[in-house]
Image (spheres, coloured by chain):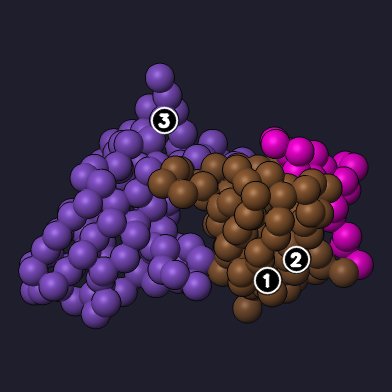
Chain colours: A purple, B brown
Amino acid sequence: DGGITQSPKYLFRKEGQNVTLSCEQNLNHDAMYWYRQDPGQGLRLIYYSQIVNDFQKGDIAEGYSVSREKKESFPLTVTSAQKNPTAFYLCASSDRGWEQYFGPGTRLTVT
Amino acid sequence: AQSVSQHNHHVILSEAASLELGCNYSYGGTVNLFWYVQYPGQHLQLLLKYFSGDPLVKGIKGFEAEFIKSKFSFNLRKPSVQWSDTAEYFCAVTYNTDKLIFGTGTRLQVFP
């Protein structure tokens, strides 16, 4: 059963702590993406990776970091430097230039 | 800057009404256009897409969209909505890259 998994579904952290969100895909897609979704703002691109061991900043990369050591995995770390980290985070993958497939998302709450 | 505009933020309709959601993009070059839908509690999923060819594209669940290059538009339509169409709808565009640029979304509520 091919798809994208994100875990956990809900995540709670205290301010000042780094937190890592998981994203795994078994679609054999080269490209993977992280978005942040906030009410009334749509989806904004945080980071993306077109190939293993390479990634680029998106529009709102400050306070986030990623790694792409394996084709199927693209974890996102929300660092303590991110000023407003509470949001819904979506991971996606695509077969280079075609439609993106999305995971179920992780809702992060930082208090 | 490249951007996508969705002017309808919240649309409320009765069942069987016709739907048209606006989408305009900012750049006049080669584009690929998408409409995604997010049903309550579900994954974001693709409704339809335009890459080339016939500018009128048909998607799932009776939706269609028309690419009008002269107007930089890709409006989504459905002749008769159902309660199950209640969702948030996102227009998105790529400009010859892998980066999708999303609009801010339109929340559609359909009442029986």
* Dot 2: chain letter: B
Q: Quadrant of the C terminus of chain A?
A: bottom left
Residue at the image point whose x is 29% and y is 42% from the top: A6
Tell me which label, 1 or 2, sits earlier in the chain. 1
Residue at the image point whose x is 45% and y is 43% from the top: B43
* Dot 1: chain letter: B
Reading the image, the residue beneath label 2 is B22
Question: What separation in Å lies between label 1 and label 2 (alpha carbons)?
Answer: 7 Å
Would you say B46 lies left or right of A44 here?
right
Q: Quadrant of the N terminus of chain A?
A: top left
Q: Do marks 1 and 2 both belong to one polypeptide chain?
A: yes
User: Where's residue B13, x and y in %?
Assistant: 70, 60
Reading the image, the residue beneath label 1 is B8
Indicate which disc residue B89 carries. Answer: none
State if disc 2 and disc 3 touch (CB < 8 Å): no
In this rendered view, identify the residue nearer to me: B85 or B60. Answer: B85
Task: Kindly identify the amino acid type of the residue bearing the numbered disc 3.
Answer: Gly
Tell me where the magenta segment starts and ends, as one range: B53-70
Is residue A80 covered in magenta?
no
* Dot 3: chain letter: A
Q: Residues within 10 Å of mark 2 (few under 14, many from 20)?
A: some
Task: Kindly identify the amino acid type of the residue bearing the numbered disc 1.
Answer: Asn
* Above/below status of A9 relative to B104: above
